[in-house]
Amino acid sequence: MIKQQQVLDVLKTVQDPFLHKNLLQTQALKYLTIEDDHVRLKIALAKQDQVKQMQIQVELSSKIKEQGAKVVSVRFAVLSDVEIKQLGGFPVDLPTLLSPGVKTEFIAVASGKGGVGKSTVSVNLALALARQGKKIGLLDADIYGFSVPDMMGIEKRPEIRHNRIIPVERLGIKVISMGFFVENNSPVIWRGPMLGKMLNNFFNDVYWGDLDYLVLDLPPGTGDVAMDIHSKLPHSKEIIVTTPHPTAAFVAARAGAMAVHTKHEILGIVENMAYYQSKKTGEIEYVFGKGGGDKLSDLLHTDLLGRVPLTQPQSKEGEFAPGVYFEDDPVAAVYNGIAEKVIGKIC
């Protein structure tokens, strides 16, 4: 049976996201009962924030269950002004990626619909940029359909260090994803305002360090989350992903139209699943048709950055990353070419 001290020990490892002190230091625990391995606790944070509360609830639940609890119920309250003052008040905010003077370039990868391989392009473009010697961050902003951690074989979660969230580093890329903050692959059922706050957290509470480029894997389509990101990043550059099928290109044009409407520069088009080449005969088949990328680039008055074939990534011994085309994979050379064009357009 889990003991009270075990719960208190867990509180030492979880921080108030506003005061940057652990929950034992802030005297956040206002109520605790343990009955039949069901832990009920009431936690007071420095501010009322549903997204932060969700993050704390997931972290507490996961860690307390590791200590032996079967069920964890968390309720939240808010610390009083007197309590906050006694704790030294709120810390001074450090610069973030959205602070004036930050030189990081934002590259948003968008699509008109799901299923065109936008996340695959985001991951492998980030890796290709890193192979060009650039310092790269990757933000999985596809809140409902996060897939980057699985594609890159990431199993650990971000840490809190020096009062900031530290991205998980994998294959030389700094990564943040909604998937890190959802327990047991639970569905995300939040609405627009909460999602907006989560995106703010990704920009303001994460210590990205010195980046040349931050690649953003946007949600497909032109919904609230995509619009919110466009409004937050007025100087973002954009890449549109489509398949060769003319209908896919037609739908992708909507994402391009939104980029134009929000005055985002379109760097170009990536045609994914452009063709299939048989490993046995070398014969090329255009499984999804031809011409979609060219049609879209003409429509949006931009360049076709590259055509990526339809093929499974080759595995690499000692590395589990099922969505990654490693450097000796022929497809990696395609992404290297796309990355070179992207750098040339931004510089």
Image (tube, rainbow, N blue to C red):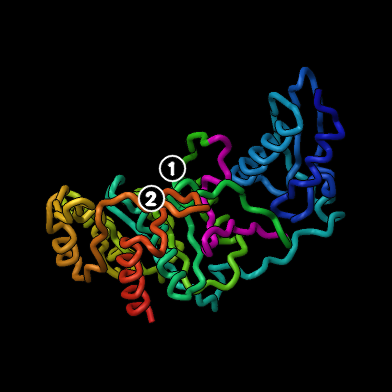
Near mark 1 (Cα within 10 A), the count class, few <14, some 14-19 or many ≥20, is: some
Element under disc 2? loop
Residue 76 location, x and y as percent? Answer: 71, 37
Q: Which of the numbered marks, if any, corresponds to residue 219? A: 2
User: In the displayed image of the protein, which residue is found farthest to the bottom?
Assistant: 347
Task: Look at 15% across and 67% down and name the residue there.
Answer: 298
Q: In the rendered view, does 312 fall on the left or right side of 180?
A: left
Q: What stretch is highlighted in magenta?
A: 163-184
Which mark, residue 193?
A: none
**Position of residue 288 in the picture relative to residue 21 (left or right):** left
Q: Distance between the residues labelled 2 and 1?
A: 8 Å
Q: Where is residue 234 in the image (x, y as percent from the top left)?
A: 41, 68
Query: For the point 47% across and 66% down, which residue is it?
Result: 214
Q: Do the residues labelled 2 and 1 touch (CB within 8 Å)?
A: yes
Say which amino acid is labelled 2.
Pro
**Above or below 328: residue 51:** above
**The residue positioned farthest toward the front in the image shown:** 280
Residue, x 75% and y 55% (percent of image)?
19
Residue that carries the numbered disc 1 in the rendered image: 144
Tag 1, which secondary structure? loop
From the viewer's side, name the closer residue of 150 and 161. Answer: 150
Q: Position of residue 251 (x, y in %)?
A: 21, 51
Residue type at mark 1?
A: Tyr
Q: Does the magenta stretch include residue 334?
A: no
Q: Which of 326 and 51 is in front in this view?
A: 326
Give above or below for 178 relative to 301.
Answer: above
Q: Can residue 42 be seen in this view?
A: yes
Q: Quadrant of residue 258?
A: bottom left
Q: Is residue 31 above or below residue 82?
A: above
